[in-house]
Amino acid sequence: MKLLLAATMVASAAAASAGTCADTPTPHTKFDDANPIDTPKAHDSDDCCSACAENSECKAWTFEAAGLARSARCYLHSSDSLPTHSGGSFTCATHSPATPAPSSAPSPAAPPGEGQNWVVIAAGSKTYGNYRHQADACHAYQVVKAGGVPESNIILMMEDDVANDQENPFPGKLFNKPTAEGTPGVDVYDGCKVDYKGSVVTAQLFLDVITGNAEKAGGKVLKSGPNDKVFINFVDHGGAGIIEFPNGDFLHAKDLNDGLQTMHDNKMYKKLVFYMEACESGSMFQGLLPTDINVFATTAANAEESSWGTYCPPDDMVNGKSLNSCLGDLYSVNWMEDADTQTGLDRTLEEQYEYIVKVRHGVFFQVVACSST
């Protein structure tokens, strides 16, 4: 089945064009312009074209498609003779004045929440020995925040007992990647805002949050709508048909898929992307996820094998100090380190999958479910 190439983690929702664009776009090409006259919000190339048509100074435009952790962008140019060069995620055109369209009744108002991006991140373990899971979760938080998702739309749950654990040689800090002595490294805990911590972090809370049940959750929940895009990232231990949370019962595969179905039935997203890090994580979706609810899911392992930690002793050194624990998980670290680069941000989901599996040898990254309406 064709992957949802437009369904990137933080891609803005596509809106219908106003029909004012008469330009002929050139795909995979951009205008070189250090000082565009405007950078209006645009969901797709038609929006960017329309924005140019509405700006009397605009002679050309460039649209940059949403990447893995970056919203779509539009650049308006005051010249149509700028140099160009190729770029896989770009589309550009010189502006051709459109023939005025006959007047018509105003379009109905867009539904609340149109085009927003929402993220739920959960680390399901506790204690310092599981350092890597909370480091992964905070790194994911930083990736989506850097990609433009507002903090108000990011929900993070984890025990939050590692950064300030007495075993941590860097109190109040978490690192997801080693560094050489003399290099301080990147503290992913800095600015990582935890919405639910401690004993409240359970499988039931996770389901309440993703299904928008504020009354039961008692705090921040998804408030996404039918035109929004949702990214869910879970990191922890798992087994056949289960994943673990730091408190309470396991989350069973059926309950997870029922929750995703509820989200779809309640029109809580346009597209949903789910990245899961856990042993035997493929068993949470394979043969269970409905094929008609527009979900793209990948896992760190298939239904029968383990996922793996990485940057483990003796490769756990940060600025000359050993943390005596694995700093990250192989699947999570690879997609996030890719997303930390501009090249990674420009990739579609399919391109990232191919890069990690084929280029970063030894990394298991399985597309277990890809359903579309």
Image: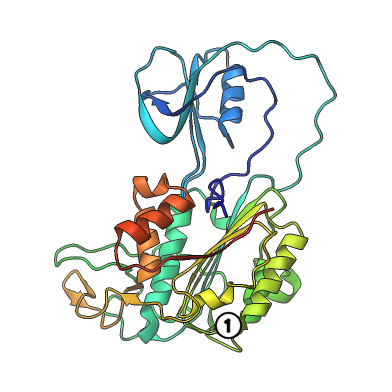
Residue at image point 44% right, 62% down: 140
Question: Residue 181: x, y in percent?
Answer: 14, 67
Does residue 268 appear in the picture of this structure? yes
Question: Residue 34: x, y in percent?
Answer: 36, 25
- The residue closer to the viewer here, 326 or 223, is 326
Residue at image point 26% right, 83% down: 324
- Write down the quadrant of residue 201 in the picture: bottom right
Q: Is residue 204 above or below residue 113?
A: below
- The residue closer to the viewer here, 119 or 96, is 96
- The residue closer to the viewer here, 206 or 343, is 343
Q: 63 left or right of 336?
A: right
Q: Residues within 10 Å of mark 1 (few under 14, many from 20)?
A: some
Can you name the residue that lies furthest to the front here? Answer: 1
Q: Which residue is mark 1?
A: 241
- Write down the quadrant of residue 114 in the picture: top right
| Quadrant into which the N terminus falls | bottom right
Residue at image point 59% right, 37% down: 43
Residue at image point 62% right, 79% down: 253
Number of numbered discs visible in the structure rendering = 1
Q: Is residue 328 above or below residue 239?
A: above
Callout 1 amino acid: Gly
Question: Residue 345: x, y in percent?
Answer: 41, 48
Question: Residue 120: x, y in percent?
Answer: 57, 65
Does residue 211 appear in the picture of this structure? no
Q: Secondary structure at mark 1?
A: loop
Can you name the residue that lies furthest to the bottom here? Answer: 248
- The residue closer to the viewer here, 320 or 52, is 52
Q: 123 left or right of 252?
A: left
What colouring does the structure picture have? Answer: rainbow
